[in-house]
């Protein structure tokens, strides 16, 4: 038999659930609406879901901290697996700018506004005052201006990704204060000036991707102190001077891309016998010899030394490398016989062309 409680208890439960989830603080809601007002996204209608009082529920891309009920994450991606894109048969496109109203969301832990292609304007300077921010991902827009000068205040920031925008100015001095930073990606911008000398203070960093900018000056020696660094991409800048030999002694460095700079001096032997497996030094001004330092530790999926000023022979020790998948020493001043051995059997002439007098398989006989 159904007692009155059979109905009353579920209704009470429902009421209490509604009051918990209906918990978006009015100030957070107002900040979100101001943020929305500065943006235009009409293809997918993502912001159509931003209505009603409860911003913590069913507002696309918004989620709240279940304990504090503050807005914790904004996650708006213009390219993703989300079914909304499949339905619309297109990727996202959004214009407008990021409103400084976002800085009123002081509970914000991640801010992802990625791959919308058309968002312009600046990164609000006040973003550096968000005390809990861990992820700032603005990749793939048209954002200009500079990285906020006091970005270093974001002591919890683990991901800073502003790649593929129009950002100019220098790397702010405070950036090296980001002691939690694990992933830095500023590729494909117009950032100039030098890499801070104290870059090595970023002890948690595992990926440092700085390619396709206008950085100049030296590669700071301190980078080699970042013992978690696995991926260092400084390619396609205007860096000069020699490579610090200590880069070859980094314990987990696996990818080192320095191609397309003005780097000169010899290739440090440490790079050849390190744990690096992708090494691109092409299109620089390296001179001297290819170090005679290959051995069983040398395992390269890519070793591109092309378009430099290397001279002398290809060292015989290269035959003792465990693996060299793709080798390119073309466009240098090398001479003498190409060593034989398993790392070479599969290579084609294009790996060796445009040198002074290299000979032997796969080029003409000596
Ligand atoms: C959004 O687009 C409409 C129509 O093109 C325009 O009138 C409006 O100013 C735009 N708003 C923003 C914030 O860019
Ligand atoms: C980095 O942090 C230290 C310690 O908090 C502070 O004294 C210094 O001014 C900061 N450097 C920059 C450039 O903001
Ligand atoms: C090395 O860098 C050059 C210049 O940036 C690029 O063209 C080349 O494809 C890269 N080599 C490999 C094997 O990826």
Image: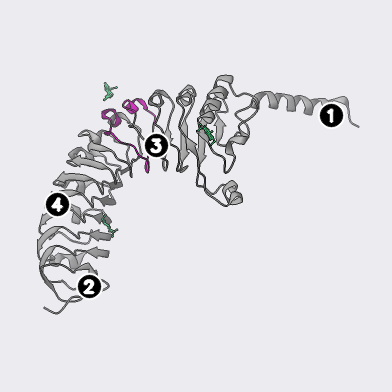
Q: Classify the position of ligand 3 by quadrant: top left, top right, bottom left or bottom right.
A: bottom left
Disc 3 and disc 1 in contact, CB within 8 angstroms = no
Q: Earlier in the sequence, mark 2 or mark 1?
A: 1
Q: CA distance from mark 1 to mark 4?
A: 79 Å
- Residue in the picture at 82% in, 25% down: 8
Q: Quadrant of the C terminus?
A: bottom left
Within 8 Å of ligand 1, the CB of disc 1? no
Q: Earlier in the sequence, mark 4 or mark 2?
A: 4
- Residue in the picture at 20% in, 45% down: 238
On the image, the x and y values in percent for residue 32 come to: 54, 27
Q: Which residue is mark 3?
A: 143
56 magenta-colored: no
Q: Earlier in the sequence, mark 3 or mark 1?
A: 1
**Of circles 4 and 3, which is in front?**
3
Disc 4 and disc 2 in contact, CB within 8 angstroms = no
Q: Quadrant of the N terminus?
A: top right
Q: Secondary structure at mark 1?
A: helix
On the image, the x and y values in percent for residue 60 come to: 58, 36
**For residue 170, which numbered disc appears in the image?**
none
Q: Earlier in the sequence, mark 1 or mark 4?
A: 1
**Of circles 2 and 1, which is in front?**
2
Q: Which residue is mark 2?
A: 349
Q: Earlier in the sequence, mark 3 or mark 2?
A: 3
Judge whether residue 244 can be spotted in this image.
no
Q: Which residue is mark 4?
A: 268
**For residue 6, which numbered disc appears in the image?**
1
Q: Which residues are magenta?
A: 148-175
Disc 4 and disc 3 in contact, CB within 8 angstroms = no
């Amino acid at each position: 038999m159904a007692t009155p409680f059979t109905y009353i208890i579920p209704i009470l439960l429902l009421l209490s659930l509604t009051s918990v989830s209906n918990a978006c603080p009015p100030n957070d809601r107002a900040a979100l609406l101001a943020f929305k007002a500065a943006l235009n996204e009409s293809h997918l209608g993502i912001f159509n879901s931003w209505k009603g009082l409860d911003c913590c529920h069913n507002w696309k891309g918004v989620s709240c901290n279940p304990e504090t009920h503050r807005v914790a994450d904004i996650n708006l991606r213009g390219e993703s697996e989300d079914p909304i894109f499949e339905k619309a048969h297109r990727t996202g496109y959004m214009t407008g700018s990021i409103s400084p109203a976002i800085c009123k969301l002081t509970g914000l832990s991640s801010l992802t506004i990625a791959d919308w292609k058309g968002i312009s304007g600046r990164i609000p300077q006040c973003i550096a005052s968000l005390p809990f921010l861990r992820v700032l991902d603005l990749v793939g827009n048209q954002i200009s201006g500079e990285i906020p000068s006091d970005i270093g205040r974001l002591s919890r920031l683990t991901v800073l990704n502003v790649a593929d925008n129009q950002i100019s100015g220098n790397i702010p001095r405070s950036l090296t204060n980001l002691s939690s930073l694990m992933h830095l990606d500023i590729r494909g911008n117009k950032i100039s000036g030098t890499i801070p000398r104290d870059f090595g203070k970023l002890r948690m960093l595992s990926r440092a991707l700085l390619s396709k900018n206008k950085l100049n000056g030296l590669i700071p020696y301190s980078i080699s102190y970042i013992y978690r660094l696995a991926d260092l991409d400084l390619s396609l800048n205007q860096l000069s001077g020699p490579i610090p030999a200590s880069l070859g002694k980094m314990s987990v460095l696996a990818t080192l891309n320095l191609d397309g700079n003005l780097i000169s001096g010899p290739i440090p032997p440490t790079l050849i016998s390190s744990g690096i497996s992708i090494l691109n030094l092409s299109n620089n001004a390296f001179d001297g010899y290819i170090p005679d330092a290959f051995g069983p530790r040398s395992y390269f999926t890519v070793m591109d030394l092309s378009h430099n000023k290397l001279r002398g022979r290809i060292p015989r020790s290269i035959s003792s490398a465990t693996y060299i998948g793709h080798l390119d020493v073309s466009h240098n001043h090398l001479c003498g016989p190409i060593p034989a051995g398993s790392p070479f059997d599969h290579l084609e002439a294009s790996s060796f062309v445009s040198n002074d007098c290299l000979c032997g398989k796969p080029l003409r006989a000596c």
